[in-house]
Image: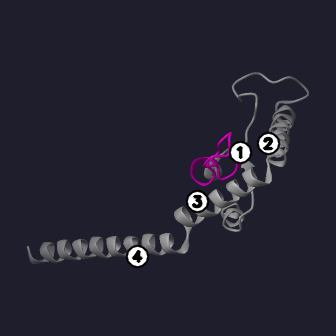
Amino acid sequence: IIMLDFQAAGLITLAHASAGPLNDIIVPSGNCAGSTGFLAAHETPPSQPRSPPSPDAAAAADLAKSFAHQLEHILSLSTEKQDEVRRNARKNAVAKFGTDVFERGWLDGCRDLSKRLDLLRDRGSREKEE
């Protein structure tokens, strides 16, 4: 949820490429066209063997390099490109997760629940009559 707050505030977001940021929140793009933020991921796939000192340390170092690379890329963008990402991020956050979207979803869910409860009540009434 913090990433959505960042985006709604027009901040450039850099997040780990997993779960919500990867699936729903951040739309990455190398050239910034349509990009809503940036993702960092392990450069070495987890299925490949890692070198000592330990798998956890190697994974952390790998991920840190990815974050550093993405941060360097963000800082190298022109002001115009950074502003484009900010606008895209805000627009995306409001379109997918804004108050209007939440309220519509909530009301649709309540209506659906009400219909299901009515069906269950009707079914129970018919069973009692039989």
Q: In which quarter of the image is residue 65?
A: top right
Q: Distance between the residues labelled 3 and 4?
A: 22 Å
98 and 89: which is toward the camera = 89
Q: Is residue 17 left or right of residue 122?
A: right
Q: Residue 78 carries which label?
A: none
- Mark 2 touches mark 1? (CB < 8 Å): yes
User: Which comes before the other along the chain, label 2 or label 3?
Assistant: 2
Q: Residue at x 58, y 59 (%)?
A: 92
Membership of 87 in magenta stretch = no
The one of 118 and 97 positioned closer to us in this rendering: 97
Q: Earlier in the sequence, mark 3 or mark 4?
A: 3
Would you name the residue on which mark 4 appears?
107
What residue is disc 3 on?
A: 92
Q: Give the range drawn in magenta.
A: 22-39
Image-based side of 51 in relation to 44, left or right? right
- Residue matched to label 2: 70
| Mark 3 nearby-residue class (10 Å; few <14, some 14–19, many ≥20) | many
Q: What residue type is labelled 3?
A: Asn
Q: Considering the numbered disc 4 on the image, is that residue within a helix, a strand or a loop?
A: helix
* 4 or 1: mark nearer the eye: 1
Residue 125's spot in the image, x, y percent? 16, 78
Classify 84 as above or below 22: below
Foreground residue, 55 or 67?
Answer: 67
The numbered disc on residue 39 is 1
Whichever of labels 3 and 1 marks the residue nearer the N terminus, that label is: 1
